[in-house]
Amino acid sequence: MDPPDAALGAPDARDAANGGQPSPAPADQDLALALLEDMLRVRRMEEACAQLYGQGKIRGFLHLYIGQEAIAAGAMRALAAGDNVVATYREHGHALLRGIALRRIMAEMFGKRDGCCRGRGGSMHLFDRATHFFGGNAIVGGGLPLVTGLALADRMQQQWRANVCFFGEGACAEGAFHESMNLASLWKLPVLFICENNLYAMGTALARSQACTDLCLRARSYGMPAMEVDGMDVLAVHAAVSQAARQVRDGGGPLFLACQTYRFRAHSMFDPELYRDKAEVEAWKERGPIHTFTARLKRVGMLTEQAFLEMDARATEEIADAIAFADAAEPEPVADLLRDLTTPALPGMPGAAA
């Protein structure tokens, strides 16, 4: 596999952006190492998925999260186990770090019955009630009304938790975005909106499709607090989501975070990627969340090269195990294909037993 982002010993690109001064050492070494391992697990999983797609073992659409790992890693470690999470079709990393076993994720990708949705959802529809992970939604902006409904239900039942929705900046042009933001603010619902702004909605740059590119300004227009976050800095994401989720749980109403990030791969495996300048992609890779954070931890003595290699080996081993599991798993039996799709006719209805 390719090394994450760039050479492991590359300097932290944010040092230059910080007036040449070194970034401060993380306050919590255990948390920092856990966040790095989370990002590495997602990266290795996504690299493997790209290979498996080329081999025909994963079919349909496949949207990779490579480059955006800091958001899922920072956010998931900041959320409580009881918080509800809704994501997009680029959700593999969110699902993994939310706690869905990689074996179940990979089996779902392979279309096998041991998958988290019995192989029926595939790449874009990962779901797991036990971890409060409510998709995986293939429709742009489709999770926004869902998370608003979950939050309304919580408020009506006096449940004090955060309902968190991840979505791309392209969703901000959808009617569902405005309707959901409006109702969440109007009813003071416990929703944390997290926009993963990777600058391109499929193949269209934000400035070419939306008149207002200040996403926080849009959120504030609905009367809710909004904050921009460096989505390439896992510690910045973790801190922002920790504070925001706590505020939402405490009854402060909805809150909006705009995480600036960048996907290093094409929109999907079908995308020829003719709309981005290669120099732009390479410039963003210099800020890759894994190698910059790795270099930062090494510089302050929190990580050695040997410890990193051991971490990487664990991630690689986990993926190999999940692939072997998915390969050996069976597809849904033909006799069960209508399971959860139909129900016996009720008495008096056409087709009901006499």
Image: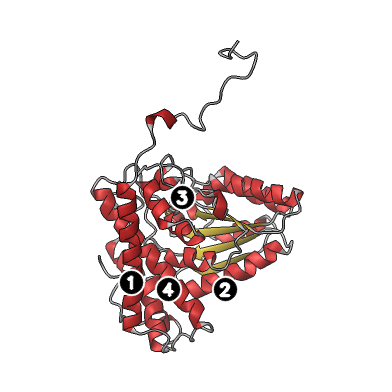
Q: Nearer the viewer, residue 305 or 295?
A: 305
Distance between mark 4 and mark 1 Cα atoms? 10 Å
Mark 3 or 4 closer to N-term? Answer: 4
Q: Which residue of the protein is positioned furthest toward the top in this rendering?
A: 354
* Disc sitting over residue 169 in the figure: none
* Disc sitting over residue 239 in the figure: 2
Which picture quadrant has residue 343?
top right
Q: Which residue of the protein is positioned furthest toward the left in this rendering?
A: 55
Front: mark 3 or 4 = 4
Which picture quadrant has residue 113?
top left
Residue type at mark 3? Ser
Q: Do labels 2 and 1 touch, CB within 8 Å?
A: no
Mark 3 or 2 closer to N-term? Answer: 3
For residue 93, say whether it is visible: yes
Residue type at mark 4? Leu
Q: Do labels 4 and 1 touch, CB within 8 Å?
A: no
Front: mark 4 or 2 = 4
Q: Quadrant of the C terminus?
A: top right
Determine which residue is flagged by label 1.
312
For residue 269, say whether it is visible: no
